[in-house]
Amino acid sequence: MVSSEREKVMSELLFVVLFGGIILTATWAEEGLLNPAKLEMFVDELQDMPKIQGFEVINGVSRPRRLKIGMYPIRWKFHRNLPSTPVFAYGTSRSTATVPGPTIEALHGIDTHVTWLNHLPQKHILPWDPTIPTAIPSNRKGIPTVVHLHGGIEEPESDGHGDAWFTAGFRDKGPTWTKRTYHYHNHQHPGNLWYHDHAMGLTRVNLLAGLIGAYIIRHPEIEQHLGLPSCDEFDHALVVFDRGFRVDGSIYMNSTGNNPSIHPQWQPEYFGDAIIVNGKAWPYMKVRRRKYRFRIINASNARFFQFFFTNGLEFVVVGSDSAYLEEPVKTKEKLLAPSEIVDVVMDFSSSRGDSAILANNASYPYPSGDQVNEANGNVMKFIIDREPELDTSRIPKKLIRYPSPDPSSASQTRHIAMFEYTSPVDEPTHLYLNGKPYSYPATETPRAGTSEVWYVINLTQDNHPLHIHLGLFKVLDQTEIKDLGEFKDCMLKINDAERCHLSRHARGKKVDVRAHENGWKNVYKMMPGYMTKILVRFAYIHSNSSYVFDATAEPGYVYHCHILDHEDNVMMRPLKFIN
């Protein structure tokens, strides 16, 4: 949706609640909201999250490992001048739990087994809305959770299906729950993933509470010869997200919806003005005058980031989402949608000054919302050592080549339409894919080992990051839809792209895929008013072989918009594999 008056007023340090037609206006202080201008930037040092090996080495040989990782209620310090914040955090114990959670480092071909344990309290720390399709325990006690390994090519039973949730001690379980211990085969190509909660209707609040963490699959035999910056000092995961706070340090989330008579709490997008990197608001990092590798994950609910350096430093992109690019790509800016990952090398030896600020200029909601302000337009600061040093790492001319997409090999062509529905006062009420609720039977039923061409038709005003579980895809092109209003009216009536003459309407301006996004993706930004053509591959891209598990097993998979507020209500559809 286009940014509401509420968001515009908040950016001017006011808070507006619409309820029953009455406008109630209050200052930051009266609402107990923290004015982010009161927090000094770049005073907390960037932290690296704890690392957990997803394998063990016995007599020099890497072997599968079993882990137990819990979800705990803890208090977390986001800024030196902010009181500690109640959060939910992943960790091997309450005392080691962090926000984000520990980075799990797995090895290609070595299995990792994780028992995810729910130690959360009976009541949530954030408001939630039972009027949208939501995981609700039978006794209405406890907080449902389930973990999804985002970007993982794994069995359905371990994918973190939204209805496979469970409460503390597994006392209550969702209708598609299968087992306590998830099996990650790690059989896919090397790259960057992340894990997060995926409980039905609660994803936005559970992630907002802190249930996120990085996951890296390494393949030393393939990666070592690349010569990229490595080791803990020069290779860092950066988990970036936005939060709003109250003056007591607690996380702010709206308790009143934009359509309170329909949805008492749900709003179409959540935005906070404080930008958090690895659990600290606007941190700083001391770096040496050499190359560093950063695996940047946008873990925001709805905020897009257009990253750039205020001193003009370049990013060298080596990977996008979970896969390496074929060759490095230099760029001055990088647009990252919620849940997208970019893998970059930064060469601080090319900086003329002794500091560099990583900034953001993406409007919110993206692309037609408010412009950034001083708070959400800054991300973090790098303090660069003045002395040059010998740097043995390098950026190779070639990285890893995977098969090129071949649309002629596609076994199926599908149309995926994105709809937003509004109330009589033109406020969003819910969002659907292909005009169908999530609960309707699966209509996308691919076969493992095949490729499909999907035409994704965005009929809304938002840019929607589409995430496909299990599958990887390449974006082929994006084409503007002419006479959009006419086409949209037809789609709302009969919901059939061919009968609504898509080919006649999809003849506008074409947008090429930028070189740094031309790899195999699991999320992509679907432009409003455009048709995006993608080729989806349901097989391993590094070997073109079949999965090492049964993809047709229950409870299946899903695909959805990764703006979490949209996903929860309920821009998500089942993806069911057949033989």
Image: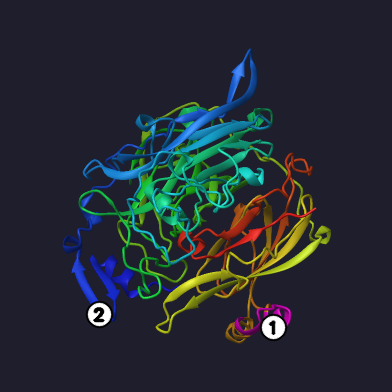
Q: Earlier in the sequence, mark 1 or mark 2?
A: 2
Front-lying residue, 313 or 577: 577
Residue 170 at what x, y percent from top left? 48, 41
The residue that appears at 42% across and 52% down in the rendered structure is 139
**Is disc 1 in contact with disc 2, using a CB cutoff of under 8 Å?**
no
Mark carried by residue 22: 2
Confirm whether residue 144 shows in the render: yes
Q: Which residue is mark 1?
A: 500
Q: Secondary structure at mark 2?
A: strand
Amino acid type, mark 2:
Ile
Q: Nearer the viewer, residue 77 or 220?
A: 77
- Asked if residue 569 lies left or right of residue 410, the reply is left
- Nearer to me, 40 or 484: 484
**Residue at left offset 20%, top offset 58%:** 32
Start-end of magenta stretch? 492-505
Q: Report whether 314 appears left or right of 531.
A: left
